[in-house]
Image (cartoon, grey):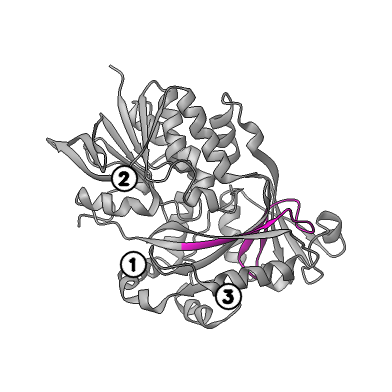
Amino acid sequence: MTRHVIVIGAGIVGVSTAIWLQRAGAQVTIIDRAGPGKGTSHGNAGVLAACAVAPVTAPGLLTKAPVMLMHPDVPLYLRLSYLPRLLPWLAKYLSVANDTDTKRISAGLAPIVSDSIDQHKSLTADLGLSDWIADSDYVFAYRTRAAFDAEAYTWALRARAGFTPELIKGPAIRDYEPALGQDITLLATMKDHGFIRDPGGYVAALAQAFTQGGGTIMKAEVKDFDLTGGTVAAVQTDQGAVACDDIVLATGVWSKPLMAKLGLSIPLETERGYHIIFGDATGGPSRPTMIASGKFVATPMAQGLRCAGILEFGGLDARPSKAPLELLRRQAKAAFPNLTATSEVEWLGHRPAPSDSLPLIGQIGTSRVYTAFGHHHIGLTGGPKTGRLVAGLIMGQPGNTDIRPYAPQRFGKG
């Protein structure tokens, strides 16, 4: 009999999962409160960052973080009123900021991201959506050689995963990327990367292809699960119950309260991320460029130049802060001195940040509830691969990737 699978979440991970399930013969319903590509998947930097194998929690973070929080030009912010709620998660997060755990986490991230371009092209191959994907270099721009050398630990992690940069110095920088200011004196360029021209539009187009293939998208909020003998039978939504054979949780940071319904306490926080789109921009880069001093990525997109970055801890409910946007605007103008635009659009979204920086991928016991969330900074990059892995588990066609590092029950019960 045809399996009916409910995918909770219509971001890149959820929609990718739904398409792979559909291809394998399942009947699939996506349930989401807002609709496809409206949340975090809309607002990311758009980079298919195959080399994104280095977690934020590198050795030394514990001593650097307080200094970073006090510096007005460092893109790390904390709402002090949120600190008491943040502390339990933060203690776990900082506990893995050591060499052993960082290398373990990096090894876990690599299988999810390292073949990102191929995975996105496989996802879109027969859907007529390949034009959303642009092949390009991914560029890291540094003011000095010393600034590049200061990140030697991170570059060593990337090298272990097979990603070694080509360095560009001196006048060759302006030949390669004329838009960069004169204070950039070194580029580390990564070949065989790419970006999405409009992430929100891309996810919406994938969702449309999914419905054209017979899938269903339901706009509703999931409230709870019906379990019979420990196995899922239905989901309870604000519009009533929906019966199913399997469930996939792929709703980012909003998966945490749903996991609590299943008796699992997940140390998952929202890392608030910002972007500004400089509409119809000129004087920006021709390819995704990470400005190392500001830790933001500038990506040319259909609407203009998107500058995305900033780390802020402040919960789901607080309004956007002004300081991160002002810093992002200031850093963009410094990096690209000739940047002009006809408009600016500001955005705030919520990255799902597990305390160990690894996504949760797999089945919860024998419940027929599967997890596909917690991708922190790699959601767009790793969405299609995650969807493929989860669809394979559900349909009895598991891949050859070791998914034990992503076990959804690794944090224990609540």
Q: Which residue is mark 2?
A: 221
Looking at the image, is 279 positioned above or below residue 50?
below
Q: Which residue is at the far top? A: 1
- 287 part of magenta stretch: yes
> Can see residue 115?
no
Looking at the image, is 408 positioned above or below residue 125?
below
- Quadrant containing the N terminus in the rendered view: top left
Q: Which residues are magenta?
A: 272-299
Q: Earlier in the sequence, mark 3 or mark 1?
A: 3
Q: Which residue is mark 1?
A: 89
Q: Marks 1 and 2, how far apart in space?
A: 26 Å
Q: Residue at x 27, y 49 (%)?
A: 258
- CB atoms at circles 2 and 3 under 8 Å apart? no
Residue 68, image x and y in percent? 53, 78
Q: Earlier in the sequence, mark 2 or mark 3?
A: 3
SS state under label 2: loop
Residue 39, image x and y in percent? 46, 50
Q: Residues within 10 Å of mark 1 (few under 14, many from 20)?
A: some
Q: Which residue is at the far left? A: 229
Q: Residue at x 57, y 39 (%)?
A: 202
Q: Is residue 35 left or right of residue 190?
A: left
Q: Which residue is mark 3?
A: 74
Quadrant hosting residue 193: top right
> Can see residue 212?
yes
- 104 part of magenta stretch: no
